[in-house]
Image: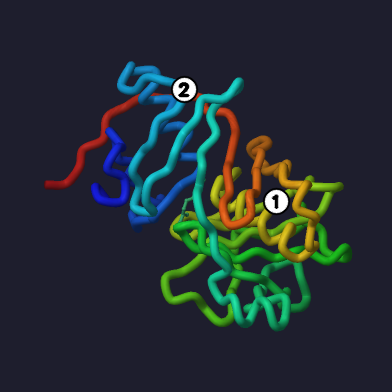
Amino acid sequence: MREAAPDAQWFMDYRNADGSEAQMCGNGTRVFAQFLCDRGLVDGVEFPIATRAGRKLITRAEHGFRTDLGPWTLSRADEARGRGMDSVVQVVGSPDPLPAISLDLGNPHTVVALPPSISLELLDLSVAPRVDPEPRHGTNVEFVRAIGPRHISMRVHERGVGETLSCGTGAAAAALATWWWAGTPSDELAWRVDVRGGTLMVDIDGGSVGLAGPAQIVAAGQVSLPD
Ligand SMILES: N[C@H](CCC[C@H](N)C(=O)O)C(=O)O
């Protein structure tokens, strides 16, 4: 980690609600940045942090922060390029399994574009969606509804958690998948992603992706780490 981010002063580690380790958390990087700024632990408008998924550059924005999430890849590129999908997802609320593509943003994501016949609001994500073939290390599953040009709405079932109100790397994966499927011209690169918890902005620059949104510390406490 030190080698991947030699100039980073701080390292963000991340655990899911069930205690499992995740390589990255996009929304977490902004709250981490807010914490560092509030405590005066970083200065400047731009600073790098280290994560298990490598160095991430944070920039202060007018309302919150932008995180350069860096490079992304299609996890099963040959399948995705050949068929426009690499897996299927069975979710409560859809009678049939739905086609999906898998992306790697440091952590794994599986994105489903919902057909018009299926309501995003009515999906039951209290039951974990089943991904086939099942990714070896699990995956975060995003369900996407197109709203307008470069504007999507999304719900997410997170690995190690369940449904959450927002997922930053998931929002980036959802925008990237929609962009990739639609073959969007290269000058249309700023995307708006509505999630249950608010709105995130995703900017796509070819093989690299950025995530911007607000950050607000809502509670403070102490955590005891095991020895
Ligand atoms: N909510 C996070 C991602 C948590 C990652 C996680 N659930 C996993 O990959 O196991 C985000 O804002 O990007």
In the image, 151 versus 140, the foreground residue is 151
Q: Indicate left or right for 70 with 170 as reference.
A: left
Q: Position of residue 14 (x, y in %)?
A: 36, 47
Q: Position of residue 83 (x, y in %)?
A: 72, 82
Closer to the chain start, of discs 1 and 2, is: 2
Q: Amino acid at mark 1?
A: Met
The residue sitting at 46% across, 69% down in the picture is 138
Q: Which residue is tagged 2? A: 45
Residue 128 visible in the snapshot: no
Q: What amino acid type should be assigned to the residue bearing mark 2?
A: Val
In this view, 131 is above or below 26: below
Element marked by disc 2: loop
Mark 1 close to ligand 1, CB under 8 Å: no
Judge whether residue 162 can be spotted in this image.
yes
Task: Give the mark toward the camera: 1 or 2.
Answer: 2
The reply to whether the C-beta atoms of the residues labelled 1 and 2 are less than 8 Å apart is: no
The numbered disc on residue 62 is none
Rendered view: 7 above or below 160: above
Counting other residues with Cα less than 10 Å from the Cα at mark 2, is it few (<14), some (14-19), or many (20 or more)? few
Could you tell me how far apart the alpha carbons at marks 1 and 2 are, in whole angstroms?
Answer: 30 Å
**103 vs 199, nearest the viewer:** 103
| Numbered label tally | 2
Secondary structure type for disc 1:
strand
Depth order, front residue of 45/32: 45
**Pointer 1 residue:** 154
> Is the residue 50 above or below the residue 119 in the image?
above
